[in-house]
Amino acid sequence: MIRNLILLFASFYALKSFGKLDYDLRLASRSYPQGIAAQSDIGYGYKLWEKDKVMYGYLRPGLNFQASGVVNYAGAQLDFYPVSFIGISYGKTYGHRSFDEFQGFDCQSISCENSIEKSHLGVNLALAYKNIKLINLYKKQDFSNETPGQFFAEEYSNLVGFEDDELTTNVTLLGYQLTEKLLIGYFHMYNKMERTNQISRAKLLMGNFTSGDFVYQAGLGTFENRNKVDHLSAIFILSWKGAKGLRLF
């Protein structure tokens, strides 16, 4: 599946001049909770109004994919940006997990292998002042679980959910643009599962280096799991920005 995604998005490279189309490909790995995946997004932005290169509004339907061999997702969403730096998104995601050894979970007593259906509502914000940049991504996900009384593992947040649970995630990145290509910053992620009242957090120092169409991101810090235990965590992301389209971030 990963190979097919790479071939699919490489084929879009010739469409770069088609300004409203956007697509990218990311390879991400994390040491705790352990995980590695290929992720892709493709969308088409319809401009609603425009004042200048920064002040405009648009509507963007899009598709997204994630593949790691044992955890695979595909989804569709609609983004509405009344102004280019703040937007609302709504989407549906479908997937399947075929792995019973997620780090930090007892997969004998909770569900780790199952089909997944979830919807999300998100609010995205990006602000900049001189060399200081702030990005905040808020998302609430509603899970559809057809098995009554079942607890399930949510591998991204490292939390346990129950039946049709809700996961709230807030990601904040505060950065400083050292050079045209290098940004350093502080990354904070907060997760909360509603019905089990479990919380996890990630706090990392990040570096972001851009070279042409490629972006290299690395971070080091701690991940506080649902048992309130801090673990050393490192993350690395390699992104290929095939076409930016109308998105600022």
Image (cartoon, rainbow, N blue to C red):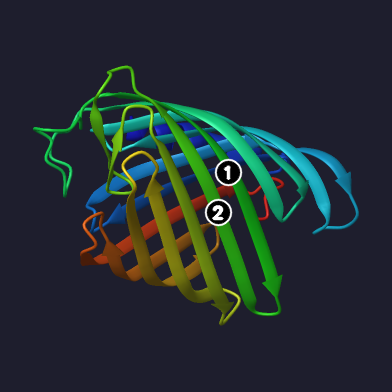
Q: Which residue is mark 2?
A: 137
User: Circle 2: is it few (<14), some (14-19), or many (20+) Cα within 10 Å?
Assistant: some
Secondary structure beneath disc 1?
Answer: strand
Q: Give the residue number, with chain letter if any, for mark 1.
A: 122
Query: What residue is shown at x 35% (from left), y 52% (from top)?
Result: 28
Q: Is residue 229 left or right of residue 65?
A: left
Q: Horizontal placement of 7 versus 113: left or right?
A: right
The x and y percentages for residue 13 are 57, 41
Residue contact between numbered discs 1 and 2, judged by CB atoms under 8 Å = yes
Residue depicted at 83% across the width and 56% down the height: 55
Dot 1: within a 10 Å radius of its alpha carbon, few (fewer than 14), some, or many (20 or more) residues?
some
> Hey, what amino acid is under mark 2?
Leu
Residue 49: x %, y % from top left = 88, 44
Q: Residue at position x 38%, y 27% from top?
A: 164
Toward which corner of the image does residue 20 lie, by quadrant?
A: top right
Q: Quadrant of the C terminus?
A: bottom right
Q: Which residue type carries mark 1?
A: Gly
| Above/below status of 191 relative to 186 | above
Tell which circle, 1 or 2, labels the residue nearer the N-terminal end: 1
